[in-house]
Image (cartoon, rainbow, N blue to C red):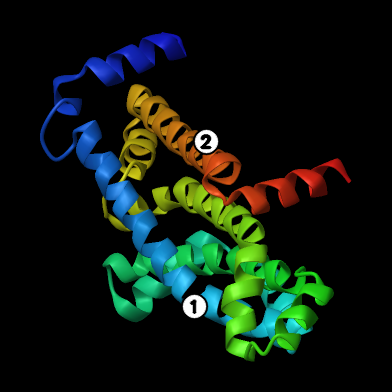
Amino acid sequence: MNWLDWLNTFFTAPARQSGPDSIVHRVWEHLVFCGEALFWSALIAVPLGLLIGYTGRGAVAVTTLTGVARALPTLGLVTLTVLLAGVGDTAVLVPLVALAAPPLLVATVEGIRGTDPELRDAARGIGLTHRQVLFQVCLPAGLPTLLAGLRNATVQVIATATVAAYVGLGGLGRYVIDGLATRDFPATAGGALLVVLLAVAAQLCFAALLRYGLPPGLRAQRAAARRR
């Protein structure tokens, strides 16, 4: 049986159409894990990145810590969290947040630091406070870089959220990990394909947002930067 036959077997199976093991249900569980992880990552990384990017303090520490965080083994973190907090959403969210927060933090810092210094000086010259300069000048200018970091974090989280099945939770990892354990290769192939399709869909959504969702001025600035 080749992989096309496996996919046909997977997608046409009655269990995939409805019930707790249906594709719709597993995709929803997967998206919930991803959404929660990205929410907590943004809550941690974006305010910290805004502060560090604007003040310039702690940038070296951010680079070091993000490098360390990226090197942490995801399954190792899952196992450690289960030992400390037991089986539950926390066991998945901790490693996913550790994975998603570093690129989002770096992108926020770089986006704010990349604001034209003359633009900052002009904003200060017309009487804007530091808070106003940050949120009305630097943040809009750094938005494309921040969104690019969020895109990278989202794709990584979608691909890695399959570890939820490692501790008996839901998501698309149930197809992949359970399929490997039981030699159900159609489920493994189908689950892997669904993860890839979700990651590609996320990439396309962010690409459309960066191309059409930004204000015209930022789109022109981004196009000019690409030409340079």
Element class at badge 2: helix
Residue closer to the observer: 90 or 223: 223
Q: Amino acid at mark 1?
A: Ile
Q: Amino acid at mark 2?
A: Leu
Decide: is 50 above or below 169.
below
Q: Is residue 192 visible?
A: yes
Within 10 angstroms of label 1, few (less than 14), some, or many (20 or more) residues?
some
Q: Position of residue 177 (x, y in %)?
A: 38, 42
State the separation of the CA atoms marked 1 and 2: 26 Å
Which residue does the numbered mark 2 point to in the structure image?
204
Residue closer to the observer: 101 or 126: 126
Q: Position of residue 50 (x, y in %)?
A: 61, 79
Residue reaching furthest to the front: 126
Decide: is 125 above or below 158.
below
The residue located at (52%, 46%) in the rendering is 213
89 displayed left or right of 59: left
179 displayed left or right of 75: left
Decide: is 154 above or below 7.
below
Decide: is 122 above or below 199.
below
Element class at badge 1: helix
Q: Position of residue 185 (x, y in %)?
A: 38, 24
Residue 44's disc number? 1
The residue located at (69%, 82%) in the rendering is 54
Within 10 angstroms of label 2, few (less than 14), some, or many (20 or more) residues?
few
The residue located at (39%, 35%) in the rendering is 180
Residue reaching furthest to the right: 228
Q: Is residue 69 visible?
A: no
The residue located at (28%, 19%) in the rendering is 11
Residue closer to the observer: 130 or 126: 126
Q: Mark 2 or mark 1, which is nearer the start of the sequence?
A: 1
Question: Mark 1 touching mark 2, by CB under 8 A?
Answer: no
